[in-house]
Image: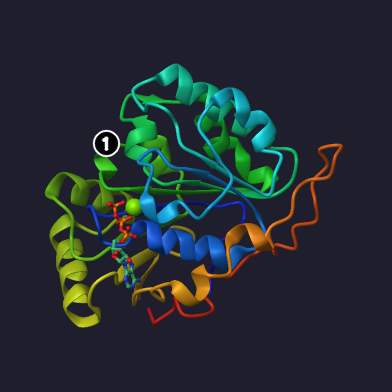
Amino acid sequence: MRGIRLSDRVIVAAPPGQGKTTLIEYIVWCLQPLRTVLIDPKEAPELRHIRPIVRDVELLPEALRGAVCHWIPHDVEDRDDLAAGFEAIWALHKHGPRVIWDDEAADTSKPGWIAPGAGKLIRRGRAWKQLYIAGTQRLAETAPVVRTQAEHIIALTPAPMDIDLDKLSQHIGINPRQLKEMLDELHEEAGAHSHLWHVQATRETRRMVACPPGPHWKTRRIQQAARAPDAEGQPAPTGAQEPSQPDREGLASGG
Ligand SMILES: Nc1ncnc2c1ncn2[C@@H]1O[C@H](COP(=O)(O)OP(=O)(O)OP(=O)(O)O)[C@@H](O)[C@H]1O
Ligand SMILES: [Mg+2]
């Protein structure tokens, strides 16, 4: 089964509260040990345990050398700040595999704008195993590159509003009406937090049950597993396999 590889781009789309952050955290947890960069523009309370937290972009270059870096941008309207932050993240792309988790891509990008560093990361980061996973409440409000480059498109149930459904439909290649039926039907059958997982490479659309709800895996914190690069800035052996298969346990429910 085609799983998520460190060279992939993943987008997780759904209206508020359907379980994007939980699912991404589960995927990131499954990938540990792996250096982790969390970009958290909404300052999500449920992500407070992922530390250290950095707010000032001036402090990011140093913080990014650690095993985990949780960046909360001061103000998502401040494009210079976002651009500087993503440039700092991109600057370390040759220092070994990482997962870059952008928790709300409609805040960190717009249909007409993306931080140049984020654009480079998404388009050119594959060769350096810079796994990019983005969540969004509003797929239509993200920069097109976030969607067009995605190897995996995950949509939680039930179906989103029409404008976002249309974008999903374009990228998954299933017409909007049929896609809405699939999402709503899955929601009825498998309940809250179930999702369709579309894999571009194989054109599969998998029907997935909710990921495990948390505490038992959340208690083993992400930073306890990942290791920092050494003092020279050389990549630490992360132990992450290529391909990583977070779908092997718990996530796969058929398809
Ligand atoms: N797989 C799951 N099993 C059980 N509960 C879940 C699951 N996924 C999410 N939840 C619960 O649903 C609520 C919303 O989840 P989450 O914060 O992940 O949603 P979200 O889509 O990221 O929301 P937002 O759009 O506000 O960022 C939380 O209380 C969370 O614990
Ligand atoms: Mg969230």
Q: Amino acid at mark 1?
A: Glu
Colouring convention used in this rendered image of the protein: rainbow
Residue lying furthest top: 80
Q: Position of residue 76 (x, y in %)?
A: 36, 28
Q: Which residue is mark 1?
A: 141
Q: Quadrant of residue 175?
A: bottom left
Sort mark 1 into few (<14), some (14-19) or many (20+) by Cα contacts within 10 Å: some
Residue at the image position 37 percent from the left and 31 percent from the top: 109
Residue at the image position 47 percent from the left and 21 percent from the top: 81
| Left or right of 5 on screen, residue 44 | left
Whether residue 106 is visible to the viewer of this picture, yes or no, is yes
**Toward the viewer: 183 or 107?**
107
* Image vertical order of residue 76 relative to residue 227, above or below: above
* Image vertical order of residue 132 relative to residue 188, above or below: above
Q: Secondary structure at mark 1?
A: helix
Q: Quadrant of residue 23?
A: bottom left
Residue at the image position 44 percent from the left and 31 percent from the top: 73
Q: Position of residue 103 (x, y in %)?
A: 41, 46
Whether residue 199 is visible to the viewer of this picture, yes or no, is no
Residue at the image position 49 percent from the left and 77 percent from the top: 216
**Considering the image in quadrants, where does the C terminus appear?**
bottom left
